[in-house]
Every structure is written in C-alpha cells, then in structure tokens.
Image: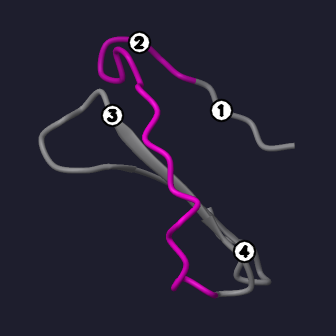
Amino acid sequence: MESDDLDEIDWEWLGGNSIVVETNYFGKGNTTIYDRATNPPCNGPLDIWHIYTVD
C-alpha cells in the first residue's frame, strides 16, 4: 500500500517459501532504510483467507 504522501506498507512473499512473509514500512518515499523489516510466520497463506486492517 502506498499513500499520496509516498508512505508505504510492504507485505512480500519472497522466493519459494510461502509461509514466511517480509514486512516493512517506509515514509515520504524514502525506501533506503530496511532495518524495520520483520519476517513473521504466515501459516496457511494459500489454504485460508486472511484479512488485514490498518488503523
């Protein structure tokens, strides 16, 4: 997701490992800082529906 101000929230599944997602966020178009990335497990991403919200 990316806002009009270029704030961005990333959810990415990388490579062949479908149960691990990489998340990150960026502000004002600055995509050079990657130290906020996390890799939480995402069990069953292809088997069940997942609903995500942003407050």
Q: Nearer the viewer, mark 2 or mark 4?
A: 4
Mark 2 packing: few (<14 Cα in 10 Å), some, or many (20+)?
A: few
The kind of residue on which mark 3 rests is Val
The kind of residue on which mark 4 rests is Asp
For marks 4 and 1 on the same chain, the one whose residue lies earlier in the sequence: 4
* Residue 6 percent across, percent down from the top left: 70, 82
| Spatial CA span between label 2 and label 4 | 29 Å
| Spatial CA span between label 3 and label 1 | 16 Å
- Return the mark for residue 48: 2
The residue pinned by badge 1 equals: 52
The kind of residue on which mark 1 rests is Tyr
Determine whether, in the image, residue 17 is placed left or right of residue 53.
left
Q: Are marks 3 and 2 in contact (CB under 8 Å)?
A: no
Determine whether, in the image, residue 10 is placed left or right of residue 25.
left
Q: Which residue range is magenta in the image?
A: 30-50
The residue pinned by badge 4 equals: 7
Residue at screen point 16% across, 49% down: 15
For marks 2 and 4 on the same chain, the one whose residue lies earlier in the sequence: 4
For marks 3 and 2 on the same chain, the one whose residue lies earlier in the sequence: 3
Is there any visible trace of residue 32 in the rendered image?
Answer: yes
* Residue 31 percent across, percent down from the top left: 54, 82
Disc 1 is placed on an element classified as loop
- Return the mark for residue 20: 3
The answer to whether residue 1 is above or below residue 22 is: below
Q: How is the image coloured?
A: one colour
